[in-house]
Image (cartoon, rainbow, N blue to C red):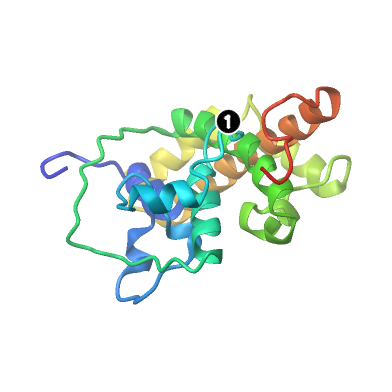
Amino acid sequence: PDGKRVSHFESFVMERYHFGFGALEGRDELPFHAFITANLSIAKELLLTLGGFDEGYSYGWEDTDLGLRAIEAGVRLLYAPDAVGYHHHEVDPLSYCRRQRMVGRSAVHFARKHPDRTEVVGLERMPRPWTWRWALKRALFNALTRRPWIALADGLCALGAPGPAEAIYSQVLADCYYRGMLEQMRASESDPAQPGTSEGT
């Protein structure tokens, strides 16, 4: 909202991870992943025809899933930059790390439901357990190193070096996201009733 002081981290994640409205400017029609339900208008009848939201998602990806089904059904998604919605969403790096972990868990459901769209959730980029890349990532980014990395990134922002800071934020958030994915995969193997395991719903 106007008048609110927004931190560099908040601006970074809102544009790169959360909404990314800047990438929608000037486009006549939008892709399914721009189906952002924080500010979206859709006819109730159409929503019901599409089957509504899939409640199998634990946190996140439910609007992307619905957007994909809408586009596949021939719905046109348009951007109205004048349709302003005030989103009071204060975040900091640690709270966003928790969010990313939950979103990672929910991404597993999306990947299983849409096996031809796994690139959307970054499944192919996930470090495979017990590989050298996995070991390196685990050594550099984990629960013990998370706060020092964030403190370093915050310090770089304060010194006027947003580029290196954003690179660090990205690595920390990716670690949390992929940890969430791995947790959900393991939970699904041990308990088929876990969220994110139903197929084709």
Kindly identify the residue that appears in the image at 37 percent across and 46 percent down.
Answer: 37
Q: Could you tell whether 51 is left or right of 123 in the image?
A: left
Kindly identify the residue that appears in the image at 35 percent across and 47 percent down.
Answer: 44
Q: Quadrant of residue 77?
A: bottom left
Kindly identify the residue that appears in the image at 74 percent across and 55 percent down.
Answer: 115
Q: How many marks?
A: 1
Does any portion of residue 36 appear in the rendered image? Answer: no
Q: Work out which quarter of the rendered image holds the N terminus and state it.
A: top left
In the current view of this chain or complex, which residue is farthest to the left?
A: 3
Q: Could you tell whether 80 is left or right of 166 in the image?
A: left
Nearer to me, 182 or 144: 182
Nearer to me, 107 or 71: 71
Nearer to me, 146 or 159: 146
Give the image location of residue 138, x and y in percent. 74, 36
Q: Quadrant of residue 81?
A: bottom left
Give the image location of residue 6, x and y in percent. 24, 42
Give the image location of residue 61, x and y in percent. 54, 44
Q: Is residue 16 above or below residue 157?
A: below
Nearer to me, 100 or 72: 72
Give the image location of residue 19, x and y in percent. 38, 52
In the picture of the structure, the residue carrying the numbered disc 1 is 58
Q: Work out which quarter of the rendered image holds the C terminus and state it.
A: top right
Does any portion of residue 29 appear in the rendered image? Answer: yes
Kindly identify the residue that appears in the image at 45 percent across and 28 percent down.
Answer: 95
Q: Secondary structure at mark 1?
A: loop
Question: Could you classify mark 1 by the number of other residues whose Cα lies within 10 Å: few (under 14), some (14-19), or many (20 or more)?
Answer: some
Q: Amino acid at mark 1?
A: Ser
